[in-house]
Amino acid sequence: MSEKLTKKQKQIVDFIIDFLKANNYSPTYREIMTGLGLSSVSAVAEHIDNLVAKGVLKKTPGSARSLEVLIDAHPETVALFNSKINAPDTSEEEIETLLKAATILDLDLE
């Protein structure tokens, strides 16, 4: 994924991640719509299609509740990036590479 997520796309991904953790299965488009206060199921479908195109989500055609998050920025991932970036023995080149990777993964390192 080389493009950053929009605010709404990030909200949808976060909602799906939280829903999966709580229920052990993915939400329906209607559950996403209700959970995020979106105006229609078609708006959710458009966002989901864009997230699939960006490589953030995977869905199985013809299968209900098949959304799968391919990029999941766990808090421990952010902590690992921050610890390596702030380590005294990390070279400038390594820091630059880590910062580029964090941007691609849409990690908030602050």
Image (spheres, helix red, strand yellow):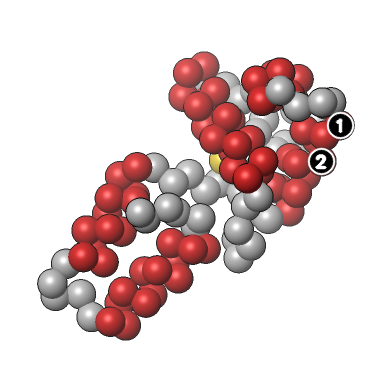
Q: Residue at x 60, y 37 (%)?
A: 11
Q: Residue at x 38, y 75 (%)?
A: 97
The residue beneath circle 2 is: 46
In-front residue for pair 72/33: 33
Question: Residue 30's x, y, as percent?
Answer: 76, 20
- Mark 2, secondary structure of its residue: helix
Q: Residues within 10 Å of mark 1 (few under 14, many from 20)?
A: few
Question: Residue 10's x, y, as percent?
Answer: 59, 43
Task: Tell me if residue 28 can be seen.
Answer: no
Question: Residue 67's x, y, as percent?
Answer: 65, 33
Q: Residue at x 82, y 26 (%)?
A: 39
- Mark 1, secondary structure of its residue: helix
The residue beneath circle 1 is: 42
Q: Quadrant of residue 65?
A: top right
Q: Residue at x 71, y 48 (%)?
A: 52
How far separated are the C-alphas under marks 2 and 1? Answer: 6 Å
- Which residue type carries mark 1? Ser
Give left or right: position of 100 versus 13. left
The image quadrant where one finds the N terminus is bottom right
Give left or right: position of 35 versus 88. right
